[in-house]
Amino acid sequence: MKKEDRVLEFLRAAGKAYVSGEKISERLNVSRAYVWKEIMALRRLGYRIEAHPHEGYRLVGIPDRLFPDEIARDLGTRRVGRQILSYKEIGSTNDAAFRLGEQGVGEGVSVFAEHQKKGRGRMGRSWVCPKGKGVLVSILLRPILPPVEVSKMTLMAAVSVVRAVRQATGLKLGIKWPNDILAGGRKVCGILTEMSAELDRVNFVVVGIGINVNASARELPPGATSLKTLLGKKISRVEFARALLREIDRDYERLIRGQFGKLAGEWEEHSVTSGKHVIVRTIGRKLEGVAAGIDADGALWIRRDDGLQEKVLAGDVEHLR
Amino acid sequence: MKKEDRVLEFLRAAGKAYVSGEKISERLNVSRAYVWKEIMALRRLGYRIEAHPHEGYRLVGIPDRLFPDEIARDLGTRRVGRQILSYKEIGSTNDAAFRLGEQGVGEGVSVFAEHQKKGRGRMGRSWVCPKGKGVLVSILLRPILPPVEVSKMTLMAAVSVVRAVRQATGLKLGIKWPNDILAGGRKVCGILTEMSAELDRVNFVVVGIGINVNASARELPPGATSLKTLLGKKISRVEFARALLREIDRDYERLIRGQFGKLAGEWEEHSVTSGKHVIVRTIGRKLEGVAAGIDADGALWIRRDDGLQEKVLAGDVEHLR
């Protein structure tokens, strides 16, 4: 642990009690001046630390920032979030995680950002989230999968997001195939899965998740909403980020153990696409019919009006009346 | 054109005739000393330039090196080889082309190398080619394809290689699905296709081709052979590289115009897999039967002993008796 983290840990361990600067300096074997300097530094980072002339210091609030150390606290995951990076500003978290993948970094590394300058959505579309109000994270994973099965990763992430939101807020969100998370028809979260692959197998996958957490209605584009808007109050982004990493860790474990069937079952429970009359657009192709559900490979089956069934692995879905 | 290239061009234009240093210096408006210096520099690169006391200089041989300017001469392609890079030594040409792809470099850029320190084959296997004896090139392409159709790119490259070899040497090679080029059961060429992709569409594809051109039998691993061994003489690697880029350019044009059917037809003509009893191994799966041929998506169809037909998009094929 770094020296400055030790001051924070000391305050944290004291809970709601005050601890004197003298006690901290004694226990950590540092000068009183050093303690005071660290308290000031922590305050600059946004930690709210009360000072009482006789009692000493007390930690009363942590900043609304996605600091790696905060997210990593008691995380307890096996793979996801084993290493956490967090940027105040970045081009795109997916690009950053992709570069780490190319450099051979191990799976589970999670790249957070408060703001993306070139946030991307599917098909080269841009993705915008108000600065400091969302949870934007890209996770590098190295599943042993052929490229055609990578859609499983997106479906997995959708299930993880829905569960994490339920835990953190009680809200029940719906999944629009393949990768939009909705509430009342409005988008709360987008997922962008990218891969580096050979024909036979994936080298690595980056699962990028962007969730509108604390943005207010007027900060969001039409058709979007946020957890805060839905819930009527702000939620802790750090706690939500932690819940999210845990759920993804759990679901990824299931996926690599060959239990995609369970995930697919959960996906169907949350699906707002299944049973709908839809138009699916893929490269050079348009398909209309009733969405029948996903299969063991994560493909969406469409029952066309002429009775034929066709499957699609990826595409844009429009829900019709 | 760079100044030093102009001296070379001047010599080239003169064909078999001598040109005096004086004439070169006058026409190019450079000093006699500069001309002499450039002649020496060209010789160091391996250009054979005869000097005659009264007649002047004459170009009698170009080096056996994959210089971009040599490959690009009269190339006349539309996309492939629009930009050519050539390394004496590199980690892997696929890695280099992949990085260019990520940096947004336009399609067609072709990365050659005389030697790869970390040459890669499929499934993370290593690929070795004697230094300066092969043609190793990785081509960055940006087809608008969903990831499941990227196997088309490999089949395309195999067809291009077979045609380029036929043109340059008259040799008729066979294609073992999906990406080995054989002569008499020995491997002449390997193809490694890698991609960066979303679920819906490919961001870019790198087609890496490694051909044993002038290696002698004792320089090659067991099971491998070279064009030189097959032909009984060396061939010009530059000319072969040029032929290869032209054929890929032509086939890629066909592919993006939706004429994969034509390529598939050519592929079948050269296939040594179709009709064979085979075992195909993919991730977590083994399939045995008779290879029936490829379909419009580039998948190989296997007729199993129980009569069922199954298709595979990628995998290892073992030809049985």
Image (cartoon, coloured by chain):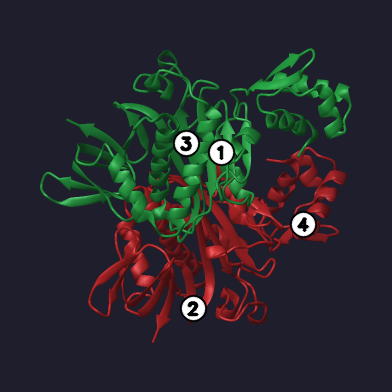
Chain colours: A red, B green
Q: Which mark is residue A183?
A: 2
Compare residues B30 and B101 and report the one nearer the observer: B30
Tell me the number on the disc at residue A45. 4
Q: Residues within 10 Å of mark 2 (few under 14, many from 20)?
A: some
Chain letter of the residue beneath label 1 in the structure image: B
The residue marked by circle 2 belongs to what chain? A
Give the spatial CA distance, label 3 vs label 4. Answer: 52 Å
Callout 3 secondary element: strand
| Circles 2 and 4 on the same chain | yes
Rounded to the nearest whole Å, what is the CA distance between mark 1 and mark 3? 13 Å
Asked whether disc 4 touches disc 1, contact meaning CB atoms under 8 Å apart, the reply is no
Task: Give whichever of B263, A297 is nearer the camera.
Answer: B263
Q: What's the residue type where badge 2 is placed?
A: Ala
How packed mark 3 is, by other alpha carbons closer than 10 Å (few <14, some 14-19, many 20 or more), is many
Horizontal side, residue B304 vs residue A299: left or right: left
In the image, taking residue A31 as reference, residue B269 lies left or right, namely left
Chain of the residue where label 3 is placed in the rendered structure: B
Distance from Cα at disc 2 to Cα at disc 4: 34 Å
Identity, as a three-letter code, of the amino acid under mark 3:
Ile
**Mark 3 highlights which residue?**
B209
**Gap between marks 2 and 3 measured at Cα:** 49 Å
> Are circles 1 and 3 on residues that touch, CB within 8 Å?
no
Residue A240 in the image: state x and y as whole percent.
56, 63
Label 1, on which residue? B95
